[in-house]
Image (spheres, rainbow, N blue to C red):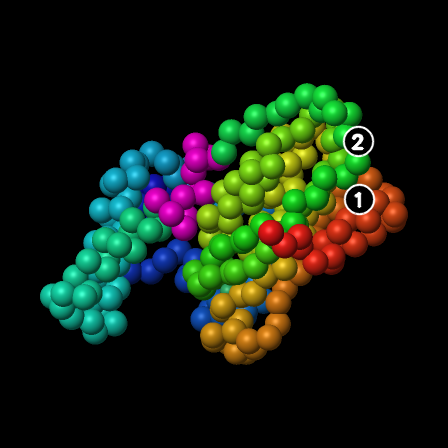
Amino acid sequence: MKPNGTSLNTRSNGHHPAYDVLSDLTIDEMGDDHVASAVETPLRADAFEISDDTKIELIEDHFREILTILGLDLTDDSLKGTPHRVAKMYVKEIFSGLNPAKKPKATLFENKYQYNEMLVEKGITVHSHCEHHLVPIIGRAHVAYISSGKVIGLSKLNRLVQYFAKRPQVQERLTEQIANELKTVLQTEDVAVIIDARHLCVSMRGVQDVNSSTVTAHYGGKFKEDEATRQEFLRHVSEPTASL
Ligand SMILES: [Zn+2]
Protein backbone atom coordinates (compact mmCIF):
# COMPACT_ATOMS: atom_id res chain seq x y z
CA MET A 1 0.00 0.00 0.00
CA LYS A 2 1.32 3.39 -0.98
CA PRO A 3 0.91 6.27 1.47
CA ASN A 4 -1.10 8.44 -0.92
CA GLY A 5 -3.94 6.03 -1.49
CA THR A 6 -4.49 2.95 -3.58
CA SER A 7 -1.85 0.37 -4.19
CA LEU A 8 -1.20 -0.57 -7.77
CA ASN A 9 -3.29 -3.71 -7.78
CA THR A 10 -5.81 -3.49 -4.97
CA ARG A 11 -8.26 -1.06 -3.50
CA SER A 12 -8.70 -1.23 0.22
CA ASN A 13 -12.31 -0.18 0.65
CA GLY A 14 -13.67 -0.10 -2.86
CA HIS A 15 -13.44 3.68 -2.98
CA HIS A 16 -11.03 5.57 -5.11
CA PRO A 17 -9.58 8.42 -3.00
CA ALA A 18 -10.80 11.02 -5.53
CA TYR A 19 -14.37 9.98 -4.80
CA ASP A 20 -14.07 11.11 -1.23
CA VAL A 21 -13.89 14.77 -2.24
CA LEU A 22 -15.60 14.95 -5.62
CA SER A 23 -19.30 14.37 -6.02
CA ASP A 24 -20.57 12.46 -9.05
CA LEU A 25 -21.84 15.72 -10.49
CA THR A 26 -18.46 17.42 -10.15
CA ILE A 27 -16.78 14.41 -11.71
CA ASP A 28 -19.12 14.59 -14.73
CA GLU A 29 -18.71 18.32 -15.11
CA MET A 30 -14.92 18.18 -14.86
CA GLY A 31 -14.86 15.50 -17.52
CA ASP A 32 -17.20 17.32 -19.88
CA ASP A 33 -15.30 20.57 -19.45
CA HIS A 34 -12.03 18.74 -19.95
CA VAL A 35 -10.22 20.58 -17.23
CA ALA A 36 -6.51 19.82 -17.14
CA SER A 37 -4.63 20.13 -13.88
CA ALA A 38 -1.07 20.66 -15.15
CA VAL A 39 1.21 20.65 -18.18
CA GLU A 40 2.94 17.54 -16.89
CA THR A 41 0.99 14.32 -17.07
CA PRO A 42 0.09 13.51 -13.46
CA LEU A 43 2.15 10.38 -12.87
CA ARG A 44 2.70 8.46 -9.67
CA ALA A 45 6.23 8.41 -8.29
CA ASP A 46 6.20 4.62 -8.57
CA ALA A 47 4.80 4.62 -12.11
CA PHE A 48 7.50 2.42 -13.59
CA GLU A 49 8.52 0.28 -10.66
CA ILE A 50 6.70 -2.69 -12.09
CA SER A 51 7.44 -4.19 -15.49
CA ASP A 52 5.22 -3.87 -18.54
CA ASP A 53 4.49 -7.60 -18.38
CA THR A 54 3.29 -7.31 -14.78
CA LYS A 55 1.16 -4.30 -15.70
CA ILE A 56 -0.46 -6.28 -18.50
CA GLU A 57 -1.25 -9.15 -16.11
CA LEU A 58 -2.75 -6.82 -13.49
CA ILE A 59 -4.80 -4.80 -15.98
CA GLU A 60 -6.02 -7.99 -17.58
CA ASP A 61 -7.35 -9.21 -14.20
CA HIS A 62 -9.09 -5.90 -13.55
CA PHE A 63 -10.53 -5.69 -17.02
CA ARG A 64 -11.92 -9.20 -16.74
CA GLU A 65 -13.61 -8.00 -13.57
CA ILE A 66 -15.05 -4.89 -15.25
CA LEU A 67 -16.49 -6.85 -18.16
CA THR A 68 -17.91 -9.45 -15.80
CA ILE A 69 -19.56 -6.74 -13.69
CA LEU A 70 -21.08 -5.34 -16.88
CA GLY A 71 -22.66 -8.76 -17.30
CA LEU A 72 -20.60 -10.22 -20.11
CA ASP A 73 -19.89 -13.93 -20.28
CA LEU A 74 -16.15 -14.21 -20.68
CA THR A 75 -16.27 -17.90 -21.49
CA ASP A 76 -17.57 -16.86 -24.90
CA ASP A 77 -14.88 -17.45 -27.54
CA SER A 78 -15.08 -13.94 -28.91
CA LEU A 79 -14.76 -12.28 -25.49
CA LYS A 80 -12.33 -14.64 -23.84
CA GLY A 81 -9.21 -12.83 -25.03
CA THR A 82 -10.54 -9.29 -24.62
CA PRO A 83 -9.12 -8.55 -21.14
CA HIS A 84 -5.66 -9.57 -22.31
CA ARG A 85 -5.97 -7.72 -25.62
CA VAL A 86 -7.07 -4.52 -23.90
CA ALA A 87 -4.33 -4.75 -21.26
CA LYS A 88 -1.65 -5.30 -23.88
CA MET A 89 -3.01 -2.48 -26.04
CA TYR A 90 -3.00 -0.08 -23.07
CA VAL A 91 0.56 -0.81 -22.01
CA LYS A 92 2.28 -1.49 -25.34
CA GLU A 93 0.36 0.79 -27.67
CA ILE A 94 -2.16 3.49 -26.84
CA PHE A 95 -0.69 4.48 -23.44
CA SER A 96 2.92 3.52 -24.10
CA GLY A 97 3.89 7.21 -24.20
CA LEU A 98 3.47 7.43 -20.42
CA ASN A 99 6.88 5.86 -20.08
CA PRO A 100 9.74 8.35 -20.63
CA ALA A 101 11.91 5.42 -21.73
CA LYS A 102 9.79 5.28 -24.89
CA LYS A 103 10.51 8.86 -25.85
CA PRO A 104 12.02 8.92 -29.36
CA LYS A 105 15.66 9.90 -29.41
CA ALA A 106 15.93 13.09 -31.35
CA THR A 107 19.16 13.33 -33.29
CA LEU A 108 20.09 16.86 -34.19
CA PHE A 109 22.01 17.86 -37.25
CA GLU A 110 23.95 20.98 -37.99
CA ASN A 111 21.97 23.32 -40.18
CA LYS A 112 24.53 23.06 -42.99
CA TYR A 113 22.25 24.45 -45.66
CA GLN A 114 21.83 27.58 -43.62
CA TYR A 115 18.11 27.22 -44.07
CA ASN A 116 16.95 29.93 -41.72
CA GLU A 117 13.33 30.04 -42.71
CA MET A 118 10.45 28.40 -41.00
CA LEU A 119 10.04 24.65 -41.36
CA VAL A 120 6.45 23.43 -41.15
CA GLU A 121 5.46 19.80 -40.75
CA LYS A 122 1.73 19.75 -41.20
CA GLY A 123 -1.05 17.23 -41.05
CA ILE A 124 0.63 14.91 -38.55
CA THR A 125 -1.90 12.29 -37.51
CA VAL A 126 -2.95 12.53 -33.88
CA HIS A 127 -4.53 9.51 -32.24
CA SER A 128 -4.87 10.09 -28.55
CA HIS A 129 -7.31 9.39 -25.73
CA CYS A 130 -9.14 11.84 -23.56
CA GLU A 131 -8.04 11.32 -19.96
CA HIS A 132 -11.52 12.01 -18.63
CA HIS A 133 -13.36 9.31 -20.54
CA LEU A 134 -10.58 7.23 -22.16
CA VAL A 135 -12.16 7.46 -25.60
CA PRO A 136 -10.31 8.60 -28.73
CA ILE A 137 -9.21 12.07 -29.71
CA ILE A 138 -8.56 12.03 -33.47
CA GLY A 139 -7.05 14.87 -35.43
CA ARG A 140 -4.08 16.57 -36.98
CA ALA A 141 -1.11 18.42 -35.59
CA HIS A 142 0.82 21.10 -37.43
CA VAL A 143 4.22 21.96 -36.01
CA ALA A 144 6.79 24.52 -37.06
CA TYR A 145 10.13 25.84 -35.96
CA ILE A 146 12.79 28.26 -37.06
CA SER A 147 16.23 26.71 -36.79
CA SER A 148 18.64 28.07 -34.19
CA GLY A 149 21.48 26.34 -36.02
CA LYS A 150 20.26 22.81 -35.35
CA VAL A 151 17.79 20.80 -37.38
CA ILE A 152 15.94 17.60 -36.61
CA GLY A 153 14.98 14.67 -38.84
CA LEU A 154 11.49 15.27 -40.22
CA SER A 155 10.11 11.93 -39.08
CA LYS A 156 11.18 12.80 -35.53
CA LEU A 157 8.59 15.55 -35.48
CA ASN A 158 5.88 12.99 -36.24
CA ARG A 159 7.30 10.57 -33.69
CA LEU A 160 7.38 13.18 -30.94
CA VAL A 161 3.74 14.07 -31.59
CA GLN A 162 2.80 10.40 -31.51
CA TYR A 163 4.76 9.76 -28.32
CA PHE A 164 2.91 12.45 -26.37
CA ALA A 165 -0.40 11.41 -27.96
CA LYS A 166 0.01 7.90 -26.56
CA ARG A 167 -1.09 8.93 -23.12
CA PRO A 168 -4.42 9.68 -21.54
CA GLN A 169 -4.52 13.32 -22.60
CA VAL A 170 -6.16 16.70 -22.56
CA GLN A 171 -5.68 18.48 -25.88
CA GLU A 172 -4.28 21.64 -24.32
CA ARG A 173 -1.70 19.62 -22.43
CA LEU A 174 -0.79 17.59 -25.50
CA THR A 175 -0.18 20.85 -27.38
CA GLU A 176 2.01 22.26 -24.59
CA GLN A 177 3.97 19.04 -24.12
CA ILE A 178 4.82 18.85 -27.82
CA ALA A 179 5.81 22.53 -27.92
CA ASN A 180 7.96 22.29 -24.78
CA GLU A 181 9.74 19.19 -26.04
CA LEU A 182 10.47 20.81 -29.41
CA LYS A 183 11.86 23.88 -27.68
CA THR A 184 14.16 21.73 -25.58
CA VAL A 185 15.29 19.50 -28.39
CA LEU A 186 15.76 22.24 -30.98
CA GLN A 187 17.24 24.71 -28.50
CA THR A 188 14.96 27.52 -29.60
CA GLU A 189 11.81 29.25 -28.42
CA ASP A 190 10.73 29.72 -32.03
CA VAL A 191 8.26 26.86 -32.12
CA ALA A 192 4.57 26.68 -33.02
CA VAL A 193 2.07 23.86 -32.59
CA ILE A 194 -1.56 23.69 -33.66
CA ILE A 195 -3.79 20.70 -33.03
CA ASP A 196 -7.21 20.37 -34.62
CA ALA A 197 -9.00 17.33 -33.26
CA ARG A 198 -12.33 15.66 -32.72
CA HIS A 199 -13.14 14.25 -29.34
CA LEU A 200 -15.23 11.12 -29.35
CA CYS A 201 -16.37 11.89 -25.83
CA VAL A 202 -18.11 14.94 -27.31
CA SER A 203 -19.53 13.21 -30.38
CA MET A 204 -20.61 9.81 -29.02
CA ARG A 205 -21.81 10.85 -25.57
CA GLY A 206 -22.43 14.00 -23.56
CA VAL A 207 -23.62 16.73 -25.95
CA GLN A 208 -23.30 14.30 -28.91
CA ASP A 209 -22.03 16.94 -31.29
CA VAL A 210 -20.60 15.11 -34.28
CA ASN A 211 -19.49 18.19 -36.21
CA SER A 212 -17.34 20.17 -33.82
CA SER A 213 -13.60 20.00 -33.56
CA THR A 214 -11.27 21.57 -31.04
CA VAL A 215 -8.33 23.73 -32.02
CA THR A 216 -5.49 24.43 -29.63
CA ALA A 217 -2.32 26.37 -30.35
CA HIS A 218 1.01 27.23 -28.82
CA TYR A 219 3.11 30.04 -30.27
CA GLY A 220 6.59 30.55 -28.86
CA GLY A 221 9.34 33.06 -29.55
CA LYS A 222 9.02 34.72 -32.98
CA PHE A 223 5.68 33.00 -33.59
CA LYS A 224 4.36 34.78 -30.54
CA GLU A 225 6.09 38.12 -30.90
CA ASP A 226 6.01 38.61 -34.64
CA GLU A 227 2.60 38.80 -36.28
CA ALA A 228 4.05 38.23 -39.79
CA THR A 229 5.80 35.02 -38.71
CA ARG A 230 2.62 33.69 -37.13
CA GLN A 231 0.57 34.59 -40.20
CA GLU A 232 3.07 32.87 -42.46
CA PHE A 233 2.72 29.69 -40.40
CA LEU A 234 -1.06 29.90 -40.45
CA ARG A 235 -1.01 30.44 -44.22
CA HIS A 236 1.12 27.30 -44.72
CA VAL A 237 -1.22 25.31 -42.51
CA SER A 238 -4.32 26.43 -44.40
CA GLU A 239 -2.88 25.75 -47.84
CA PRO A 240 -3.88 22.42 -49.36
CA THR A 241 -1.39 19.62 -48.68
CA ALA A 242 0.79 18.65 -51.64
CA SER A 243 -0.61 15.63 -53.45
CA LEU A 244 1.64 12.77 -54.51
ZN1 LIG B 1 -13.50 13.36 -22.59
| Residue drawn 56% across the image and 38% down it | 155
> Most prominent secondary structure in the magenta stretch?
helix
- Which of 3 and 179 lies nearest the eye of the viewer? 179
Res 102 quadrant in image: top left
Q: Outermost residue, left direction?
A: 75
Q: With 90 as the anchor, is 211 left or right in this view?
A: right
| Residue drawn 61% across the image and 25% down it | 108
Q: With 30 as the anchor, is 93 left or right in this view?
A: left
1 vs 2, front mark: 2
Q: Which residue is mark 2?
A: 116
Amino acid residing under circle 2: Asn
Q: Which residue is mark 1?
A: 223
Dot 2 alpha-carbon crowd within 10 angstroms: few under 14, some 14 to 19, many 20 or more: few
Mark 2 vs ligand 1: CB under 8 Å?
no
Check if residue 94 falls in the magenta segment.
yes
The answer to whether residue 161 is seen in the rendering is yes
The stretch of residues the image draws in magenta is 92-103
Image quadrant occupied by the N terminus: top left
Res 220 quadrant in image: top right
* Mark 1 vs 2: CB contact within 8 A: no
Dot 1 alpha-carbon crowd within 10 angstroms: few under 14, some 14 to 19, many 20 or more: many
Residue 172 x/y as whole percent: 62, 54
Q: With 17 as the anchor, is 113 left or right in this view?
A: right
Check if residue 178 falls in the magenta segment.
no
